[in-house]
Image: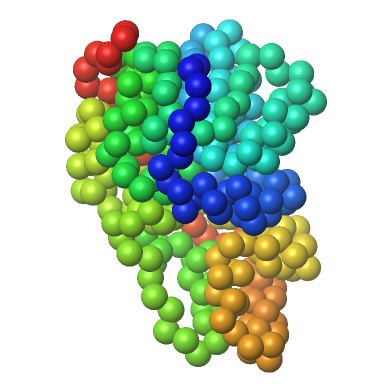
Amino acid sequence: MRGHEVATNAEQARAWNGPDGDNWTENEDWYNAAARFLTPPLFSLASIEPTEHVLDIGCGTGETTRLAAQRAHAGTAFGIDLSARMIERAQQRAGDEAITNIRFGRGDAQVFPFEPASFDIAISRYGSMFFGDPVAAFANIATALRPGGRVALLCWRELGRNEWVRELRNALAAGRDLPEPPPNAPSPFAFADTDRVRAIFAEAGFARVSFDAIDEPMYFGPDTERAFAGVSKLGIVNGLLADLDETRRREALDLLRETLEQHQTPDGVLLGTSAWIVRATTTQEQEGS
């Protein structure tokens, strides 16, 4: 890999090198456990081969990169993320597990100077929907992939299909009419519209775009108290509480706790999700291949 460039996703860079990155790093076990039913379908459909070279976009503290490195045991895995603290933790975890075919770098995949045609596949677990210019981002990622290289991305479907977000919003609304995220702006739901995603990938140099629906629960914890402790740290929760006075804030949190209690099952506190696994392949040889 060559040197780093300044991130163009400035707002995201500030967040992930500030409170969001700190929060995730300090609570990485909870966040990784939350995706325990969603990660296996991503890797099943990614079909990483033992000799492949894998790029992990928005790798966070590196759980998915480590999983990729284990599958590509005769290849390599490279994780990239905006957050310096999360990359530091990712390197620490890989060292603790003595994984030797793995590397991490801090950077913005939208502009990062990847070595051309150096990867067979790019994966992402909920890290690909926040680019300021998604066409530019995936065009840049396409240059990093060999001819016929592919992507496999886990992305949320629309808000209305995701019980976990609806329930959190309903609990914390406190009588307010909450706006929905704009469909074409960087947000968790930016890739919900399949027509938009197809257009982005076509312009960025990909073809054979496909969508596999994944409807697995999100795991919030083994019981209500531990679920509440984890959920209370979510960015969406803190954002919804920010404008409430102390009384309404306390009432909203009480309702949130009740909501989580209603979703207690023998397997823990589970709320429904709906996601796409988006797959595509590059359409032409990339410069430098």
Residue name at image x 43 percent, y 21 percent: 114
Horizontal relation, residue 271 to residue 116: left or right: right
In depth, the one of 107 and 167 nearer the eye is 107
Q: Position of residue 71 (x, y in %)?
A: 58, 19
Q: How many marks?
A: 0
Q: Is residue 96 left or right of residue 16?
A: right
Q: Residue at x 48, y 70 (%)?
A: 166
Asked which quadrant contains residue 119, the reply is top left
Quadrant placement of the C terminus: top left
Res 37 seen here: no
From the top left corner, tell me how far across and down residue 236 is, in percent.
Answer: 55, 65
Q: Examine the rendered structure and indicate whether residue 33 appears above or below residue 225.
A: above
Residue 116, placed above or below residue 126: above
- Closer-to-camera residue (253/265): 253
Tell me which colouring the rendered structure shows.
rainbow
Farthest residue to the front: give it: 6
Is any part of residue 76 visible from this angle?
A: yes
Q: Residue at x 61, y 69 (%)?
A: 238
Q: Quadrant of residue 256?
A: bottom right
Position of 131 relative to 115 (above/below): below
Q: Position of residue 95 (x, y in %)?
A: 76, 23
Q: Position of residue 81 (x, y in %)?
A: 54, 37
Image point (29%, 56%), residue name:
184
The image quarter in which residue 102 lies: top right
